[in-house]
Amino acid sequence: MQLSGTLRIQELTAEERAVYATLKPERLPEHVAIIMDGNGRWAGRRSLKRFLGHQQGAKSVQMVTETASRIGLPWLTLYAFSLENNLRRPRAEISFLMRLLKTYLENNVQRMMDNNVRICYIGRTHELPPEVQDKMRWAEETTARNTGTTLTLALNYGGRSEMVDAFRSLAAEMQRNHSSPDRISEEDIRRHLYTAQMPDPDLLIRTSGEMRISNFLLWQIAYAEIFVTERLWPDFRGVHLLEAIADFQRRERRYGGLGEGGGEVEEDPERIRLAAG
Ligand code: FPP
């Protein structure tokens, strides 16, 4: 993994440092993506309004981002607002989430600067309210020269609509270049995705126990390791990110191959006999 910025391990909490000590720093994932789920349930269990769950969830966003920046994680991508949320949630909840995003950016850009965090976005962000877009642009421009963790917020995002947008843009390019469809490669599709400048996630975390992908980064998670925790997003902290990374490091990534020790698998004698004729 390429470490981004400077490691700031001394800034981790004692609990985080204890988990970090079990990690192999040279095998940290390069990109962690998180489906933040469970804000509503967190509030419901406390007989609070859903809005308060989202508000608490925004605090988790900042805390997890800061831990990511301290351990030198280059890319952190958070599913903050899906296209489906935008279409299916009550208007009042959507406008609350938009106000929360604006306030989150206003209140946290200085902390992003202090932590060398760069913020950017993926999704059909041009459909968000103009005043939210203005704040997003301001945060992106202010943090643009930071060299530590890149925090990407997926906003008004859907994996299938990302592919539609990518195919439209690829088709337009092909038309301009008079190129033929049978020359399309995976690389052509990749470079038209919103995530063209990022590596694919190595680790996908989902909070609140649901075993779903929910239309998140469908192309990009082809070989991601998936970690699902029962913990609800407002209770998720940096130490839980480190625990997920520890679990990731215990896995063997095979990318469709046999992995370590695969060469030692005994050949089927019948297959050898048939091949020998
Ligand atoms: C799921 O909770 C989470 C969301 C709808 C989006 C995530 C939003 C935040 C973490 C808050 C704001 C984020 C930023 C970046 C300021 P849910 O309502 O679906 O929970 P439930 O499944 O328990 O009802």
Image (cartoon, grey):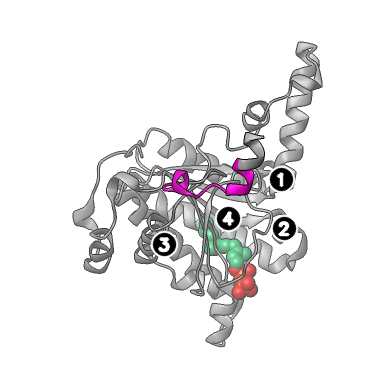
In the picture, measured across the screen, residue 242 lies left or right of residue 259, that is left
Q: Position of residue 171 (x, y in %)?
A: 78, 25
Residue 88 belongs to the span the image colors magenta:
no
Residue extending farthest left: 10
Tell me the element at label 2.
helix
Where, quadrant-wise, is the C terminus in this rendering? top right
Q: What residue do we see at 37% from left, 46% from top?
A: 73
Q: What residue do we see at 69% from left, 50% from top?
A: 158
Q: Residues within 10 Å of mark 3 (few under 14, many from 20)?
A: some
Tell me the element at label 3.
helix
- In magenta, the rendered stretch is 260-272
Label 2 beta carbon within 8 A of ligand 1: no
Q: Residues within 10 Å of mark 1 (few under 14, many from 20)?
A: few
Say which amino acid is labelled 4.
Tyr
Disc 2 and disc 1 in contact, CB within 8 angstroms: yes
Q: Quadrant of ligand 1?
A: bottom right
In the figure, residue 190 lies in which quadrant? top right
In the picture, measured across the screen, residue 97 lies left or right of residue 170, that is left
Residue at mark 1: 127
| Viewer-side residue, 212 vs 173 | 212
Residue extending farthest top: 178
Residue at mark 4: 79
- Which of pointers 2 and 3 lies earlier in the amino acid sequence? 2
Picture layout, residue 76 above or below residue 207: above
Q: CA distance from mark 2 to mark 1?
A: 10 Å
- Which of pointers 3 and 1 lies earlier in the amino acid sequence? 1
Q: CA distance from mark 2 to mark 3?
A: 29 Å
Q: CA distance from mark 1 to mark 4?
A: 17 Å
Residue at mark 2: 86
Tell me the element at label 4.
strand
Tell me the element at label 1.
helix
